[in-house]
Image: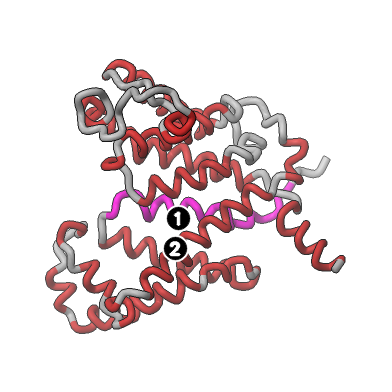
Amino acid sequence: MRALISAWDQFWFAPLDPRVPAALRIGYGLLGLWSYAALWPTLAWSLADGGLGLGVGKSGPDVVNLLANPLWSITTLGEVQAAFLVWMACFVALVLGVGGRLPMLGAWLGIVTLGERNPLLIDGSDGVLRVLGLWMLFLPLNAVWSLGRPDPNAATVEHTRWPLRMMQLQVCIIYVKTGLIKALYPSWQEGTAVFYAMASPKYWRFPMEEILANPAFQGFTVLATYATLVFELGFPLVFVPRLRRLWLTLGLGLHLGVFAFLSLGAFSEVILWSYLAFVVFPPSRRPSP
């Protein structure tokens, strides 16, 4: 029993390398700028009054409305533009490591409000940033690699591994659930799913008619279909130290391959960013006195 309790404590509360949350913070900020800055020219019709913002409306500050859409009362074009600039400033502050936890809260609230205000603007990548961003609120983000003051919780960084574990488990849930759903479809059972996905021209990064007509490539897509299922269903093996590097490398190859051939928004970039939660940095070398 003592061994079980010790393993539990080690899993959730072992010392946390502050470089991991710092890397996640910088990546989150860069992804936010990359994914959302381009929305600026569309604000009039996508998020402001009179546009296509399906979630826009001043129905009143009830608890449910505030939780689902924290910025429910900001609807005029001027208000939306001002809030958008503050949102972008939060992402910049995350990259620089200034402002304490407020930039992380602001960036996360912006993503939550965006999805509730106009669901047509979001996809799976936004959902991942939204879910994982919640757990980042509890991490010591500015302990290192920060231009601002050190995080006030840096002194107790060894007690804050649990939010990182929650992020890791969330990534595992995403993969396993996706794998289970895919396994129910005949195209995945027959090994044709990857081919059909790549055969849709609306997702092509470049013309692929000749590639898809190649018998060798068709055979590769069958292998890739089954390999994807094995990888996603087996992703929890990333917690096995000897298999962590292998599984993350397989995921890197999978998502880089998807990125190279198909345009699926920022999903590949966001998922690869989430791998930072599993990275084990080499021991830091402090200069001898």
Q: In this view, does 6 lie above or below 212?
A: above
Residue 64 lies in magenta, yes or no?
no
| Residue for point 67% across, 36% down | 143
Mark 1 residue element: helix
Q: Position of residue 83 (x, y in %)?
A: 38, 22
Q: Can residue 236 be seen at all in this image of the molecule?
A: yes
- Of the residues under marks 1 and 2, which one precedes in the sequence? 2
Residue 87 is drawn in which quadrant? top left
Residue 204 is drawn in which quadrant? bottom left
Given the current orientation, which residue lies at the most extreme right position? 2
Q: In the drawing, does residue 100 fall left or right of residue 123?
A: right
Residue type, label 2: Leu
| Residue for point 31% across, 21% down | 75
Q: Do the residues labelled 1 and 2 touch (CB within 8 Å)?
A: yes
Q: In this view, does 140 lie above or below 244?
A: above
Q: In the drawing, does residue 147 fall left or right of residue 85?
A: right
Residue 193 is drawn in which quadrant? bottom left
On the rendered image, what quadrant is the C terminus found in?
Answer: top right
Report the span colored magenta: 264-285
| Residue for point 23% across, 83% down | 216
Q: Mark 1 points at which residue?
A: 272
Q: In the drawing, does residue 230 fall left or right of residue 167?
A: left
Checking the image for residue 252, the label placed there is 2
Q: Where is residue 95 in the image (x, y as percent from the top left)?
A: 50, 34
Residue type, label 1: Leu
Q: In the drawing, does residue 51 fall left or right of residue 56?
A: left
Q: Where is residue 86 in the image (x, y as percent from the top left)?
A: 42, 22
On the rendered image, what quadrant is the N terminus found in?
Answer: bottom right
Looking at the rendered structure, the number of numbered marks drawn on it comes to 2
Q: In this view, does 108 lie above or below 224?
A: above
